């Protein structure tokens, strides 16, 4: 079993022996047995896939010099079996993307990311919904998340997922609470739980 430890991935039984290190990453499962990681990479979203059986642990001291000199966000002693980026410049809607075969077993992956707002009432965040099996990404600007309503930089959406029964997207807004979106995936329906 591998778990996210602050900014590293490590076996639960050996948390001091990281397998991958990142300044901001989210792991996801790639069937049948691989580990995916997504992270922001400049003006792109980077998706990498590792064979979890082949990941080798490393000493944190090994990575210290590398992290200072590199603009790369992922450090691992084992190369990924697939690695690609999707630009953040897409307009709202569905877009075709090239997906490596090693990661195509993922049906859906929802990635929250900043979005270029032109004014204080324009969406400042979007959900990139990856349909990797189909080679598609749907961009859903969050019309409710604007600079006039929220403190951009102090408040953001760190995660979102789809409810398997209603098929609606729910998530968390850091510093605000948990939310449920309307059917279109772009508008806030309700707060499930507010932060205190």
Image (cartoon, rainbow, N blue to C red):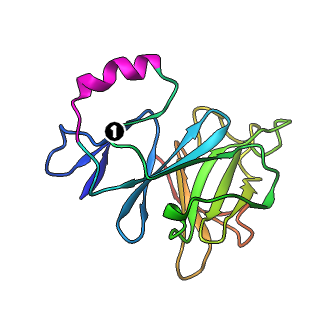
User: Is residue 177 covered in magenta?
Assistant: no
Given residues 160 and 32, the one toward you in this image is: 32
Report the side of 113 relative to 184 (left or right): left
Could you tell me residue 192's position as x and y percent?
54, 63
Q: In the structure shown, which secondary structural element does the residue marked by tag 1 occupy?
A: loop
Residue at 60 percent across and 50 percent down: it is 112
| Stretch of the chain drawn in magenta | 57-69
Report the side of 71 relative to 75 (left or right): right
Report the side of 131 relative to 164 (left or right): right
Could you tell me residue 44's position as x and y percent?
65, 41
How packed mark 1 is, by other alpha carbons closer than 10 Å (few <14, some 14-19, many 20 or more), is: few
User: Residue 179 appears in which quarter of the rendering?
Assistant: bottom right
Q: Which residue lies furthest to the bottom in this view?
A: 165
* Residue 178 visible at all: no
Residue at 48 percent across and 33 percent down: it is 73
Is 92 above or below relative to 104?
above
Residue of label 1: 6
Q: Which residue lies furthest to the left in this view?
A: 13
Overall secondary structure of the magenta section: helix
User: Is residue 59 covered in magenta?
Assistant: yes
Give the total of numbered labels: 1
User: Residue 169 appears in which quarter of the rendering?
Assistant: bottom right
């Amino acid at each position: 079993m591998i778990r996210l430890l602050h900014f590293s991935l490590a076996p639960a039984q050996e948390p001091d022996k990281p397998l991958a290190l990142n300044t901001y990453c989210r792991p996801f499962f790639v069937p049948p047995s691989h580990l995916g990681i997504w992270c922001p990479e400049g003006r792109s979203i980077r998706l990498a896939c590792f064979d979890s059986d082949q990941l080798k642990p490393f000493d944190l001291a090994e990575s210290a010099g590398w992290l200072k000199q590199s603009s790369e966000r992922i450090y691992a002693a084992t190369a990924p079996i697939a690695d690609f980026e999707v630009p953040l410049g897409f307009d709202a809607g569905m877009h075709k993307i090239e997906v490596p075969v090693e990661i195509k077993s993922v049906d859906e992956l929802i990635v929250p990311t900043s979005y270029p707002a032109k004014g204080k009432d324009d969406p400042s965040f979007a959900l990139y919904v990856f349909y990797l099996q189909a080679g598609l990404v749907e961009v859903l600007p969050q019309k409710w998340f604007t600079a006039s309503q929220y403190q951009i930089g102090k408040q953001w959406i760190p995660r979102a997922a789809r409810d398997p029964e209603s098929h609606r997207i729910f998530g968390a807004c850091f510093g605000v609470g948990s939310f449920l979106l309307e059917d279109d995936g772009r508008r806030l329906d309700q707060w499930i739980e507010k932060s205190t």
